[in-house]
Amino acid sequence: MTTEVLKAPLIVDFPFTRSLGPVQSAFLTGLREQVVLGVRTTDGRVLVPPVEYDPVTAEEIRDLVQVAPTGTVTTWAWNHAPRRDQPLETPFAWVLVRLDGADTALLHALDAPGPDAVHTGMRVRVRWAAERSGAITDIACFEPYDSAGGAEVAVHDGQFGSMVTGIVAQARLDYTYSPGRAQTAYINALAGQRIVGERCPSCRKVYVPPRGACPTCGVGTAEQVEVGPGGTVTTYCIVNIKARNLDIEVPYVYAHIALDGADLALHGRIGGIPYDQVRMGLRVEPVWTEGGRYPDHYRPTGEPDADYETFKELL
């Protein structure tokens, strides 16, 4: 009987926080103040957006200059179906714009009525966002602008009131995930509170979770083997930072667990024992919650600790 391979939508969503060096701090603060800053290299090129190290020589560069909010489209692509959180909700063009006074191009959106209205070499200008906070989105987009180029750059000290020193960017990936044949069988077995792996026909090792191929021999695997339920803690870490949307009090222990009959350790949370009593060699078993599709955690079995020689190859 052929088992239908699973697939499901998957969203990875998290805030990415980073601090800013003096160049990026000045650039983003400048956008808040409707000022576009670049950086001048030792050979006289002006880079916008600015970088802190010369991409050719790798030397540090700090000489900030102000360029014009007008520029020329160097290349473009039409976006006929904008996605969530993109600069504009209506169709627009992604453009590389070389601002007047700059030697490199800045990527952003161009608000245009259609692709026929966009061409390489067209003149554009910045449309500033109504509310600005010190981010690239302070440039709402570019818009067509009928003017000649040739603006001069001006030296700028990069100083503004209340400098932006860090940013938080919301990172998100939306895609459809399919675990494939081997992991579909693994997930279906978990629904029945069984843990299965697959044995390599060459080296005879059993891999859990299975991937459909042996990572050592490079051959396909198909022979299903039930492992566990007991296992041995091979190594572990103590978690002291509480994760968002995870209702587990810190500190707690996450461990690599070599299930009996498996040749690869999987990971799981250790419960039923104080975190400072978890150790290598601890014998554990899975704890399933009602309706759970995978073990909630692993707890000590009460057996004597496993000898190091029995699991050293699984570290």
Image (spheres, rainbow, N blue to C red):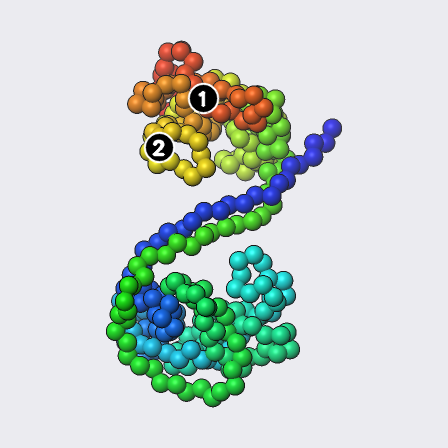
- Percent from the top left, x then y, of residue 150? 41, 87
- Classify residue 160 as left or right of residue 125: left
Q: Is residue 87 above or below residue 146?
A: above
Residue 200: which quarter of the image? top right
C-alpha span from label 2 to label 1: 16 Å
Q: Is residue 203 visible?
A: no
Label 1: element kind: strand
Tell which circle, 2 or 1, labels the residue nearer the N-terminal end: 2
Q: Residue furthest front?
A: 130
Nearest to the observer: residue 206 or residue 185: 185
- Percent from the top left, x then y, of residue 263? 48, 26
Circle 1 crowding by C-alpha within 10 Å: few under 14, some 14–19, many from 20: many
Name which residue type carries label 1: Tyr
- Percent from the top left, x then y, of residue 211? 56, 35
- Percent from the top left, x then y, of residue 197? 56, 27
Q: Is residue 239 visible?
A: yes
Please name the residue that numbered disc 1 is placed on. 298
- Quadrant where the image shows the C terminus: top left
Nearest to the observer: residue 254 or residue 11: 11
Name which residue type carries label 2: Val
Q: Residue sitting at 36 percent across and 71 percent down?
A: 33
Which mark, by number, is residue 239? 2
Q: Is residue 98 above or below residue 290?
A: below
- Quadrant where the image shows the N terminus: top right
Q: Residue sitting at 72 percent across and 31 percent down?
A: 2
Nearest to the observer: residue 230 or residue 220: 230
